[in-house]
Image (cartoon, helix red, strand yellow):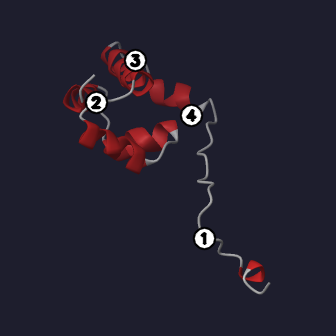
């Protein structure tokens, strides 16, 4: 799915990108990166399509998603440590 089609689905779901990312607990930067690629992964496109369809049918998908108690993953990597105790060695 193209990024433009994805944004149209978000409009149909009455969501903005920041609201969408907050709802599904993903980084807004990740979603914005698809703009450069001009293509959205199938899983993200499927979620947006379901939200748009549910909204059209009058189903409160926000409550359904909130009830899942999704947790946003914290970035872990080999970046620089903020722990000063590691620098003293």
Q: Count neighbours of disc 4 (C-alpha within 10 A) and say few if under 14, some if 14 to 19, many if 20 or more.
A: few
- Which numbered disc, 2 or 4, marks the residue closer to the eye? 2
Q: Position of residue 22 (x, y in %)?
A: 46, 44
Kindly give the residue lying farthest to the front in the view shown: 89
Mark 3 sits on what residue?
50
Q: Earlier in the sequence, mark 1 or mark 4?
A: 4
Dot 3, how many residues are within 10 Å of its Cα: few (below 14), some (14-19), or many (20+)? some
**Residue at the spot 65% in from the left edge and 71% down from the top edge:** 81
Nearest the eye: 89 or 71: 89
Q: Give the residue pinned by disc 2.
A: 39
Element under disc 4: helix
Is tag 3's residue or tag 2's residue first in the polypeptide sequence? 2
Mark closer to the observer (3, 1): 1
Task: Identify the residue shown where x is 52% and y is 41%.
Answer: 25
For disc 1, the marked residue is: 80
Image quadrant of residue 16?
Answer: top left
Residue on which disc 4 sits: 66
Above or below, comparing residue 29 to residue 48 in the picture: below
Helix, strand or loop status at disc 2: loop
Query: Which is closer to the viewer, label 3 or label 2?
Result: 2
Report which quarter residue 2 is drawn in. Answer: top left
């Amino acid at each position: 799915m193209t990024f433009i089609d994805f944004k149209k689905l978000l409009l149909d779901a009455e969501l903005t990108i920041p609201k969408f990312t907050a709802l599904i607990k993903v980084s807004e930067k990740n979603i914005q990166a698809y703009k450069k690629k001009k293509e959205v992964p199938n899983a993200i496109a499927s979620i947006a399509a379901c939200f748009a369809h549910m909204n059209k049918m009058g189903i409160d998908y926000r409550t359904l998603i909130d009830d899942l108690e999704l947790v946003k993953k914290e970035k872990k990597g080999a970046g620089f440590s903020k722990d000063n105790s590691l620098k003293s060695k």
